[in-house]
Structure formats: structure tokens, C-alpha cells
Image (spheres, rainbow, N blue to C red):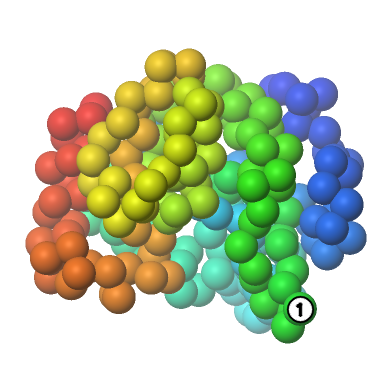
């Protein structure tokens, strides 16, 4: 696991969000090469399964996108668009947000805001050419750096946005957990979505 150098900013024992500090097993910092072309930003670590042989989930591994379903699918997508092993994974929110049933709930706006300086430190350290924001909450977090908001997430998918304050292009993608539902609503079949993502990324790099 690789950490940005700004560990004083990343607060190894961060307790900014009491509910998250109580529900987490581990903080899920970013992982990957610190000279990666792409940074992939997810929503938050998954609840996971501590007894799984692999793909145990970010709450147990401390790594982003380590659930079997979402992690496998996002890695496959990135490989298909030509950037295998040239990405750094992280999350908009670094701690598992536990719902009443023990599964993931949506992070709150305050939780996203509290974690934004951690994400900013990672972006400054890695200095990616493009940030792939997977899902609504990751996209909202990236837009908030410039004081922006999001009226409709699906309308923003595959539409590159320049983040002036960070000097990086943001490309919103469907979250892999929901892409089967939304790909068709965007007018694509799965292969067409991959091709469209590759074309949008080529425009953004």
C-alpha cells in the first residue's frame, strides 16, 4: 500500500466524523503508483467480508475498490480503455459509512466535506492527468473543489469537466455497482459504453 507523503494532512487516526470513526475497521487511503496517469475516485469503502479469501472490502483491507463486484468491474473497465496498472485508487470518503442494516449507506454532505482535504492531498501528490469520478458522490466531491454542484448525475457521465482549483480534468463515470442499470438508459450497450469512455478519456488526457 502506498501513501502520499502528506501524512500530517491525511491524519492516520482521523476522527473528523464521529459516526464514521465508530463504524470503520480501517481507514481506506489511496493505493497505487504515485505517478499514475489516472486517479479513480470511488464513493466510500465497502462493508466487505472479513472472512473472504480475497476481495474483502475496503473497510477491512484499507484499500479502495476491493469488493469483488465493484473492484473487479472497475479494473476491467480501466484495462479495456487502455490504462491497466496506470491508475491510483482512492475514495471520496475514507471510512465505511454504516447503515442501520450494517451495509453501506450514502455518505452525508458533511462527511464528504470533511474528507475533501484528504483527497486534495492525494491529488496534489499523484498529480494525475485525469480523475475518474465513479458515481454521484465522487463526482459531487470533485465539483465541490470549485464550489460547484450537481443537478443530475447521469447527465454528467462521460462529460469531462475541468477542475480549475486543482488543475485536473474530471471525467464522471457510472459507479460499477449500478452501471448495468444505467448503461442502457444512457443509450449504450456495454461495449459501446466502454468505447465511449475510452473516447471521452482520450479527449480529456
x and y percent of residue 42 in the render? 51, 52
Q: Is residue 204 left or right of residue 93?
A: left
Q: Quadrant of residue 159?
A: top left
In this rendered view, identify the residue nearer to me: 158 or 25: 158
Residue pointed to by mark 1: 100
In which quadrant of the rendered image does the N terminus lie? top right
Of the 4 image quadrants, the one containing the C terminus is top left
76 displayed left or right of 56:
left
In the image, residue 99 above or below residue 121: below
Residue 179 visible in the current orientation: yes
Vertical placement of residue 168 versus 152, above or below: above
The residue lying at 50 percent from left, 73 percent from top is: 68
Does residue 32 appear anywhere in the picture? no
Quadrant hosting residue 181: bottom left
Who's the residue at 36% across and 34% down the image? 170
Q: Position of residue 52 (x, y in %)?
A: 66, 80
Q: Nearer the viewer, residue 1 or 201?
A: 201
Q: Residue 97 versus residue 51: which sits nearer the camera?
A: 97
As drawn, 32 above or below 125: below
Amino acid at each position: 500500500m502506498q501513501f502520499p507523503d502528506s501524512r500530517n494532512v491525511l491524519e492516520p487516526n482521523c476522527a473528523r466524523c464521529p459516526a464514521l470513526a465508530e463504524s470503520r475497521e480501517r481507514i481506506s487511503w489511496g493505493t497505487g503508483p504515485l505517478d499514475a496517469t489516472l486517479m479513480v475516485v470511488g464513493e466510500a469503502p465497502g462493508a466487505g467480508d472479513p472472512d473472504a479469501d480475497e476481495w474483502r472490502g475496503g473497510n477491512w483491507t484499507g484499500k479502495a475498490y476491493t469488493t469483488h463486484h465493484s473492484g473487479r468491474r472497475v479494473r476491467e473497465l480501466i484495462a479495456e480503455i487502455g490504462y491497466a496498472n496506470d491508475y491510483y485508487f482512492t475514495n471520496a470518503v475514507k471510512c465505511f459509512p454504516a447503515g442501520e442494516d450494517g451495509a453501506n449507506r450514502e455518505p452525508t454532505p458533511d462527511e464528504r466535506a470533511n474528507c475533501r482535504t484528504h483527497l486534495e492531498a492525494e491529488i496534489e501528490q499523484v498529480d494525475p492527468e485525469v480523475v475518474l469520478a465513479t458515481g454521484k458522490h465522487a463526482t459531487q466531491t470533485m465539483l465541490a473543489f470549485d464550489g460547484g454542484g450537481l443537478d443530475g448525475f447521469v447527465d454528467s457521465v462521460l462529460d469531462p469537466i475541468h477542475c480549475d482549483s486543482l488543475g485536473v480534468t474530471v471525467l464522471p463515470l457510472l459507479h460499477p455497482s449500478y452501471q448495468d442499470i444505467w448503461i442502457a438508459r444512457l443509450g449504450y450497450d456495454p461495449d459501446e459504453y466502454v468505447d465511449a469512455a475510452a473516447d471521452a478519456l482520450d479527449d480529456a488526457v
